[in-house]
Amino acid sequence: MSWLEIVAVATSFLAIWMTAKRWMLCWPINLLACALYFRLFLDVRLYADMVLQALFGAGILYGWIIWARGKAESGDVVVVRLAPAHAAAALALGAAGAVAIGWCTSHYTNAALPWIDATLSSFSLVAQYWAARRHAANWLLWIAVDIVYVGMFVFKGLTLTAGLYAAMIALAVFGYRRWTRGERAGG
């Protein structure tokens, strides 16, 4: 466990808690967490997750804009229902991305866990996109992804990060409950 991992964990936890609460400040805190984890994943050769952090950075900027435009008169960020056809298409893209990323990292890098890393990274992008678009379903995908991430990080010896991802499962349950209430209430 390094100082970098400790700071990344604390920053990420705060950012996800703020996202679950639908607070706009979550976006700059998430951006900082991405930068910290980019460096940490570089150090432990989880290249797909390292690139994922860079892509998350772009997604965070996108989400920040979408959320700023998607507020109710009360100032609350409005939750939007995810259409089943859009969910199926996004999950199919996540699977295709997992295969493409996994093949590239298994053939062209010394990635430690190329296929699992690629799969988690690809579906994390789908979940991030759904969060930016204000879909409560993002939390369900995060729960599934984070369960597997816990095992991968334990295997890689990143026990504090594994603990963060275990806590993120609980935060995702909290976020899903809050967001589905917001979805039903229209805000």
Image (spheres, helix red, strand yellow):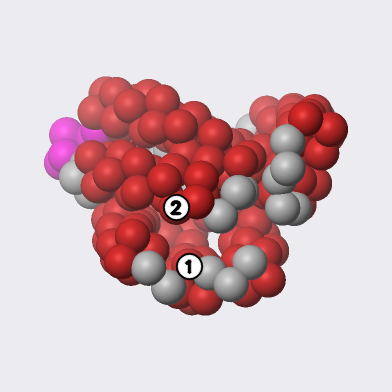
Q: Residue at x 41, y 46 (%)?
A: 39
Magenta residue span? 71-76
Q: Does 45 appear in magenta?
A: no
Quadrant in which the C terminus is drawn: top left
- Residue 31 or residue 170, whichever sits in front: 31
Amino acid type at image mark 1: Thr
Q: Residues within 10 Å of mark 2 (few under 14, many from 20)?
A: some
Give the x, y percent position of residue 149.
Answer: 63, 62
Q: Is residue 17 visible?
A: no
Q: Residue at x 38, y 63 (%)?
A: 5
Classify mark 1: helix, strand or loop: helix
Give the x, y percent position of residue 24.
Answer: 22, 42
Image marks 1 and 2: residues in contact by CB distance under 8 Å: yes
Q: Does 73 appear in magenta?
A: yes
Q: Residue at x 23, y 40 (%)?
A: 28
Residue highlighted by disc 1:
161
Give the x, y percent position of residue 80.
Answer: 46, 36
Q: Is residue 51 visible?
A: yes
Classify mark 2: helix, strand or loop: helix
- The answer to whether 5 appears left or right of 48 in the picture is left
Taking 134 as reference, is 184 above or below it?
A: below
Residue highlighted by disc 2:
40
Q: Earlier in the sequence, mark 1 or mark 2?
A: 2
Of tags 1 and 2, the one toward the viewer is 2
Q: Main secondary structure of the magenta part?
A: loop
Q: Residues within 10 Å of mark 1 (few under 14, many from 20)?
A: many
Q: Residue at x 24, y 28 (%)?
A: 68
